[in-house]
Amino acid sequence: MAQVMVNFRIDEDVKKSMEQACKEMGLNMTTAFTIFATKVGREKRIPFEVTAAPQPGRRPRPQEGGQGEGASAPARRQERLEALCGEIRRSLTAIHTAIPASITGLAMERIRLLCGDELKDKAAQAARAVRALSPGGGPQEGRDLRILDEYLDGLSSIAEQLRETERTLIPAMRTWSGGDAGCFEPYRQGLAGISRRFDALGPVMNRFLCSTAPSGGAQEVRARIRQAAAGVETPYVLTALDNLEALILRHYDALRDQTKTRLGADYLQTLELTLRELAQAERDGADAGARAALCLRAVNVVQQVVSRGGQDRQEWDSRSLEAEVTALERLAALRGDAGDGLRPE
């Protein structure tokens, strides 16, 4: 599929704001606009409400006791998955159509088969699985979204590797001057590796479809945050809270108990207080800018604690494992069970 360049002008502040939002969602502006264009082309409508007097946005809330993540975060995940499938399909098509008939040999024939048949079929299978996750086909509600994020990460890695292959392989084919085509063997190996990575994604999707959303722990923390933010209307605060909730769902249950205690007793209480004060200011019609900024600061602190806590846990686990191995080495040396000059200290 050929690509075209689209140029248009937007306000500088709007551009900066969108770049920051895309960065927080792990996207770039090109991908964001591609998602928008894909949705418009498929659904034949603007994928959000357009009114003459927009009202302050309210983050959708699930029913009490539900396991949902709200409408916005699953929608963004779904759009990202669909965009990745589109990027993969485009890269495969670009590579396949660029292969000249003049290049022969086993490596190039295998590349042609991989891009035209094997990888194309596996990409189509992944796209069907992703489409089945949409609200009309099979909602994400009630399943462990951490597994779906694992699938998304794998798909993103495949798309990135294909983009790099496209960027280097197509110019190499165009500048090939004849002779031995064995120079294309590394590309064949790379594409074969992508095929194996597609195979590994299938079991991940199956695990997700058979999973159940975890209860307690992260879910309870998220419920506390949502209850405190029930009356908040400031859009950028709600976006920050969506990002915080995703981080909590991914990392909270792996935190050490000491970190969880500090979060519940100190940081979350402060965040809840700032959210309630912001909601009160909005109801009173007061200038809520300063309180919204304070909320963002509190959200940022909680994000840092959760992220750093997860890193500390990984580092602690690593140190504990190293200590166990060291103890086993010393024990083996003491008993004379280890050779190669290993001696106890």
Image (tube, helix red, strand yellow):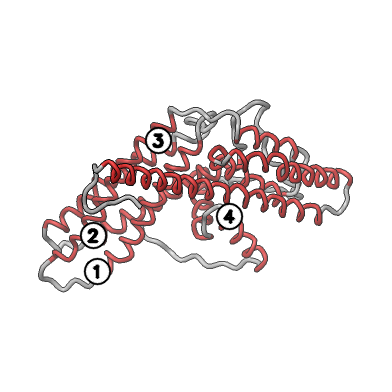
Whole-angstrom CA distance, mark 1 to mark 2, is: 10 Å
The answer to the question of whether label 1 and label 2 lie on touching residues, with beta carbons closer than 8 A, is yes
Q: Which residue is mark 2?
A: 187
* Residue 269 pos. (x, y %): 75, 41
User: Is residue 233 found left or right of 325 in the rendered image?
Assistant: right
Residue 205 has which mark? 3
In primary-sequence order, the first of circles 2 and 3 is: 2
Element marked by disc 4: helix
- In the image, what residue type sits under mark 3? Met
In primary-sequence order, the first of circles 4 and 2 is: 4
Report the residue at 67% width, 37% height from top. 60
* Residue 148 pos. (x, y %): 46, 39
Residue 24 has which mark? 4
- In the image, what residue type sits under mark 4? Glu
The answer to the question of whether label 4 and label 2 lie on touching residues, with beta carbons closer than 8 A, is no
In this view of the protein, can residue 82 be seen by the observer?
no
